Structures are given as C-alpha cells and as structure tokens.
Image: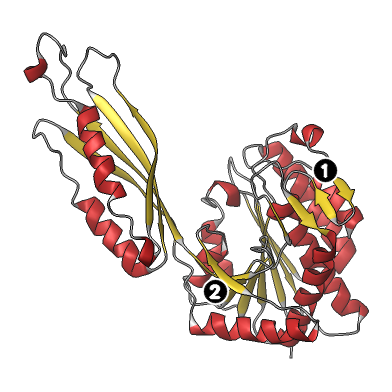
Amino acid sequence: MLADLRTYVELESPSSDKESLNSTLAWLGSWLDERIGEPARIHRVDGGERGDIEVRDYPGRGDKPILLLCHYDTVWPLGTLAEIPFRIDGDRGTGPGIFDMKSGLVHAVWALRALDAAGLERPPIRLLLNGDEEIGSLSSRPVIESEAAGVAAALVFEASADGAIKTGRKGVGIFRVDATGVEAHAGLDPDKGCSAIDEIARVVLYLHGLTDREKGTTVNVGVLEGGTRTNVAAGKASAQLDVRVASQEEADRIDRALAELRPHDSRATLTLSGAWNRPVMERTPTTVALYERARAIAAELGVDLRECSVGGASDGNFVAALGVPVLDGFGAVGDGAHARHEHISVQGMLERTALAAATLDALAG
C-alpha cells in the first residue's frame, strides 16, 4: 500500500495543470487494472481545461452499484514535491496531496483487493475519478449527478475529520457584488461624486449581518476591490463572498437577502453574480442508517467510528442532494488539508482500508 501511495503522491496533479492531470489519470488506469482487474465499463468525459472524469464499473453481487467517489487533483502547484517530498517517518506519512486525498483512493483499491483475497464477494462498484474537485467540480458535477442516479449508496474517500465519518456537509455559495458609482474630485466636487466604495462598504456590513452561527450559516466577504486614487470618489468597487449553510432553508433565506440588495445612493448600482457551488449534504435518515451500519462494523474491528458535520464541501454534496445515502471521510486519518503540515497515519491507512472492505462486504450481502 505504501509503495502504491508513494508512486501516486509523486505524480503531481495540480487542478490547474491539464498535462499533469492527464499523466496521472493514465497511470491510475493502468494501476487500477493491475490491482483490481479490468472494469466492465469505462466512461471517460473530457474535462476541457480541467481534469478529465473517468467512471469505472466493476461487476458484483447486487442490483444497484455502490458509488466510490475519489478526486485525483490537488491544491499543490508543480514543484511542491521538491519542497515536501513523500516521506514515511514512523506512523507519519507526508507529501503533497497525501491527506487530501490520494491516500483515500489507495484505501478504496486495497479494500477491494482485501475482499478478493478473503474470498468475499464485492457489491457492484462504480468508481468515479475526477480532476477538478479542488476548484469546484464545475466540469465533473453533471457526470457525478448522472452516474449517481440509481446507486444504492455512496462512499466518499475524502480525508476523515480526526477519524470521524462525515454525515453532513454545508452547502457552499460563491457570490460577487459589483458597485458602480459616479467619479468626481473628492476635494473640489465631493457632492458630484457617488462613491462605489461607500456602497460596497454598506453591502459588506449587510452581508456579514446575515451570519447565523446557531443555524450553521456563515457569510464571509474575503476579497474587496475598488477605487483608483485617494482623491477620487470611486467609480467601481466589488466584494467577493463565501457563504456556508447547513440547511436548504438557510440557503433560501440567503437567496432572498441577496435579492433584496439595493444601493444607498440612487445614483449607484449594485450587480449580483455567482451561484451555489454545492448543495447542502444534510444528515438524512437513510444516511444515518448507513452510518449506524458502518459503526457496528467498525465496532467489530475494535474501532469507535464517530460521525460529524463539517463546514467544507465535497462531491458527496451533489450525490446526497439526489437522495442517495452518503458516508464521507472514508479516507485518511491525519491532518493538514491544503496545508504544508499535511500528513496521514500509516496505521490509520490499515484501519480505514479494513473498515471500507468490511462495509462493502456488508453492502454486498
């Protein structure tokens, strides 16, 4: 497993580099054929400027497949490997993308190998690999939603949350507000001007006021731009914001609030753009039932499998919104997603692989 992980981590695959993503996906295809056999179907979709999406169907016992979601892109630019090489030091493994989420795919593959080695049947498996998850899954979303139709359940091999399975994830909205004012000399003709910066400042206060932590809603304006010179009333300004919600009800409230944006000065205009990048992954009864099943299996392995809800989103959000039970976080035990201290536990690899194999065995029964 560590040898496979080393090869995979040392294939750098930043979301922005199409050539590197193609090389990585080509290696993954050969590796998968060698490790778990050739699939009954391969469906590859061109990702355009982003990484391609590849879906592999493997036969098994059961009417409906189990969807395994794994992305092969990382946030790290080319050359990071030279700064943060793959290394195993005791129980700690490091390298770019090892935690988010290259270790997870290794778990999934070796879980299937474990079933074969133990003489157990697999359920039908639909393995989906996408190369643009870290930049919003814009190309892969329609493929994910199409391939998720009719599956029995989905396991997402994203990193765990300190070992916990994720049964809920917030929905994410990425929006931008552009303000247009009237330029004028700030000293000679202040009354002739209409400051776009003044407008956008009022918008920021309004937007931040929409945060409701008790309901799990946060609104953060992370980027502000505007103006040309200190002595000119700004003609243009903009605010870019990130919205996180834990329920569709809150998403609807935010939509209504954004639709009610109005300029303070009638000479100014406000323009809203952007959209919800990922729907809410709510903790539904079917997901809870699947989690309880996995928790019982984990207990047989001597593992206390906890659950949690997190603010970050994944491709599991798309699948859960279709009504499919989803367990996210079957990947690495470790820490440091998108950070230079990114690392995994080697013992955690064995634990999560055994858990995935046992869960898939149960889903085949």
Badge 1 crowding class, 10 Å Cα cut-off, few under 14, some 14 to 19, many 20 or more, is some
Dot label at residue 149: 2
Q: Could you give the CA–CA distance between mark 2 and mark 1, rounded to whole angstroms?
A: 34 Å
On screen, residue 72 above or below 265: below
Looking at the rendered structure, the kind of residue marked 1 is Glu
Q: In the image, residue 29 lies at what x, y percent?
A: 80, 56
Observer-side mark, 2 or 1, equals 1
Question: From this viewpoint, is residue 238 visible?
Answer: yes
Closer-to-camera residue (358/163): 163
Q: Quadrant of the C terminus?
A: bottom right
Q: In the rendered image, which quarter is residue 203 located in?
A: top left
Closer-to-camera residue (4/341): 341
Question: From this viewpoint, is residue 61 visible?
Answer: no
On screen, residue 182 above or below 261: above
Label 1: which residue?
10
Residue 187 located left or right of residue 238 = left
Residue 188 located left or right of residue 237 = left
Q: In the image, residue 275 lies at what x, y percent?
A: 37, 51
